[in-house]
Amino acid sequence: MKERRSVHTLFRFPYRLENNFMPAGEGTEIMSYSLSHVGQVRDDNQDAVKLCDPDSGISEVSGYLYGIADGMGGYAHGGVASSVALETFFETYYAANGISPLQKFRVSIQNANLSVYQTAHRVGAGRMGTTLTAVSILGSELYIGHVGDSRAYLIRDGSTRCLTNDHTRVGELVRMRVLSPDKVRSHSQRSVLNKCLGLELFVQPDIFKMPAQNGDTIILCTDGVWSVIEDEEFGALAHSASNLEDLGQRIFTTTMERNSDDNVSIVAIHLNRLANVNDTSVAIRTSALSRLFRKFVR
């Protein structure tokens, strides 16, 4: 099945809606769907989404990669920042050979950070920033890289689990047990980031892996989505949906009906069948990392 793109006129305000629906390649069956919409309040869409190309063949070797980014509305060119970050992240990840998937994530996020930082200086935009949350499926492993307050959810056996921590002041209060998790969505400083890409020369991302299973559903979303949908509701919406496109539309409709005040972006992934591939982690090759790093700092 080839990628299908469609644009729907749904609301009477400026919008950008991108729908992508595609299966993974041979040996592994992964369905994915993405949607990005300006929402009901913003004048422009500062979110970006990106899916791997299942026909390229590289995903079977390096992993099926999916990402989402949310440019910072308080700084100039947030939409540029999110797009640059994802493009650089994907390019670096698939060019990195001879290193483990976890190291691929680390060098790819660092290069994405530098690209945003340098783009801001090159175009005279001042400070530019963005979140970035990405997952890669390789064999029976799920790899996650994360900076900011976009989120990754795992829906498995009817239960929903948020895999990422919010890099915000409010998120820090929750981890310190000063604030209850159920107060996050209504907190006045919910979106105040204490970590993102593009503001400093280096960033410390969260990078980890966990076992994946056939039947898992993974949802990546920006805070314009999760701010109005409770964690457990994602599982309920997935249970009631007939397919990934239906799930994406149900999440989108729910978000709009609840008057989200931000851009609305979703990446939904369903693992139909995972290939039996051994963990491809190998010893880190310093020279390979250095070459990749230098490529983006010239």
Image: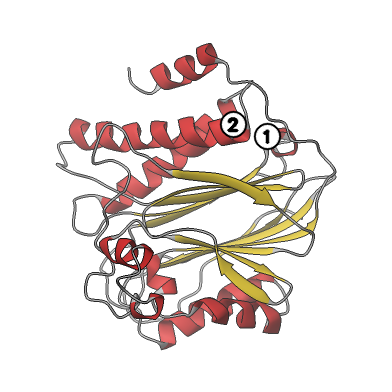
Which of the pair 3/67 is nearer the observer? 67
Task: Give me the C-alpha separation between circle 1 and circle 2.
Answer: 7 Å
Tell me where residue 215 sits by quadrant.
bottom right
* 277 to 241, vertically: above or below: above
Local packing at callout 1 (Cα closer than 10 Å; few below 14, some 14-19, many 20+) is many
Q: Nearer the viewer, residue 98 or 67?
A: 98
**Residue 202, above or below 214:** above
Work out whether residue 271 or residue 8 is closer to the camera in this orientation and state it: 271
Q: Secondary structure at mark 2?
A: helix
Is there CB contact under 8 Å for labels 1 and 2? Answer: yes
Name the spot of residue 101 as percent of width and height, x first.
Answer: 61, 34
Amino acid at the residue labelled 1:
Ser
Q: Give the image location of residue 247, x and y in percent.
A: 62, 75
- Tell me which residue sits at (38%, 23%) in the image: 296
Query: In which image quadrant can residue 150 be found?
Result: bottom left
54 or 260: which is nearer to us? 260
Residue at horizontal 66%, vertical 59%? 32
In percent of width and height, residue 14 lies at 32, 71
Residue tagged 2: 94
* Residue 246 can be seen in this image: no
Please give the label number shown on residue 250: none
State left or right for residue 183 relative to residue 230.
left
The residue tagged 1 is: 62
Would residue 52 appear left or right of 146 to someone viewing this image? right
Quarter containing the N terminus: bottom right
Q: Could you tell me the amino acid type at mark 2?
A: Tyr
Image side of residue 297 versus residue 101, left or right: left
